[in-house]
Image (tube, rainbow, N blue to C red):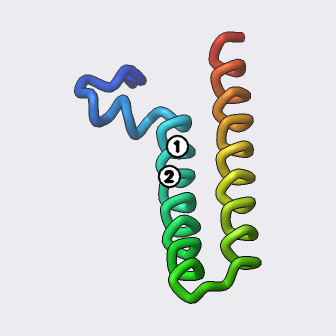
Amino acid sequence: MDDNPKNPIEKLYKNSTSIILLVGIIVTALLFKGLLMFADQGDLFMVILMAVAVSVVAFVLTKVIRLEMEKKIK
C-alpha cells in the first residue's frame, strides 16, 4: 500500500502537526472571543485571565509542535 499521498490536501491531513495547529488556532480564537466579550462587560479580572489563557495555549502549542518536529527529524 502506498503511504505517499498524491495531492497536497492529503499531505496536509496526514500531517499531525497541521491538525495540532488547527486545533490550537480554534481554541485561541474562542478564548480571544471570550476576552473581547469580557472587555465589553468591563470585567478586568476576566480579561486578564483570558489573556493569560491565550498565552498558555500559545506556549503549549509551540512546545507540542517543536516536539513533533523533533520526532520527525529523528
Please state which of residues 46 and 22 is positioned toward the viewer in this rendering. Answer: 46
Q: Residues within 10 Å of mark 1 (few under 14, many from 20)?
A: some
Crowd rating for badge 2 (residues with CA inside 10 Å; few <14, some 14–19, many 20+):
some
Spatial distance from mark 1 to mark 2, Cα to Cα? 6 Å
Q: Of residues 8 and 21, which is closer to you in this image? A: 21
Depth-wise, is mark 1 or mark 2 nearer the camera?
2
As drawn, 6 above or below 64: above
In the image: residue 15, left or right of residue 71 = left
* Residue 65, image x, y percentages: 64, 33
Relative height, residue 11 to residue 29 (above, below): above
Seen from this angle, which residue lies furthest top? 74
Label 1 sits on residue: 21
**Picture coordinates of residue 34, whole percent (x, y):** 55, 76
Please identify the quadrant where the C terminus is shown.
top right
Label 1–label 2 contact, CB within 8 A: yes
Say which of 12 and 1 sits in front: 12
Which residue shows up at 59% across the image and 81% down it? 38
- Which amino acid, mark 1? Leu
40 lies above or below 68: below
Q: Is residue 36 above or below residue 69?
A: below
Give the position of the N terminus as an image quadrant: top left
**Kind of residue sitting beneath label 2:** Ile
**Residue at point 57%, 78% (across, down):** 39
Report helix, strand or loop for mark 1: helix
Q: Position of residue 21 (x, y in %)?
A: 52, 43
Q: Residue at x 25, y 23 (%)?
A: 6
Label 2 secondary element: helix
- Identify residue for label 2: 25
